[in-house]
Image: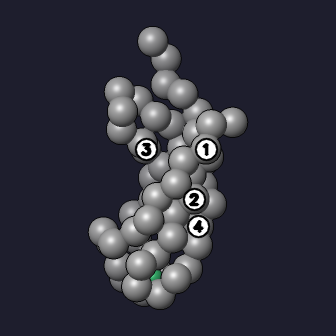
Amino acid sequence: MSAERVKVTIRCKRCGEKFVLRGRRDRGKIDTGFKMCLCSNTDEFDIEEERT
Ligand SMILES: [Zn+2]
């Protein structure tokens, strides 16, 4: 099975910044390459995915 392409909206829980990225879902894991927010937050996010 090949990876699904997904559009992902990531919202930072610390500063409220939103990022819209394209990623791939592979075996239940989403890979967007996103590392951290502008405020240095690396793990407190709300993540919403949308199939394209
Ligand atoms: Zn932030």
Q: Does the residue labelled 1 lie within 8 Å of ligand 1?
A: no
Quadrant for residue 35, please give it.
Answer: bottom left
Would residue 36 appear left or right of 32 to someone viewing this image?
left
Disc 4 + disc 2, Cβ < 8 Å? yes
Residue type beneath disc 2: Thr
The label nearer to you, 4 versus 1, is: 1
x 35%, y 27%: residue: 27
In the rendered structure, find residue 19 and report the number of the disc placed on it: 4
Local secondary structure at mark 4: strand
Q: How is the image coloured?
A: one colour
User: How packed is label 1: few (under 14 Cα within 10 Å), some, or many (20 or more)?
Assistant: few
Please determine whether, in this image, residue 15 is positioned above or below residue 23: below
Residue that protrudes farthest toward the top in the picture: 1
Label 1 vs 2, first from the N-terminus: 2
Write down the residue under mark 2: 9
In the rendered structure, find residue 50 and report the number of the disc placed on it: 1
Q: Position of residue 42 (x, y in %)?
A: 33, 71
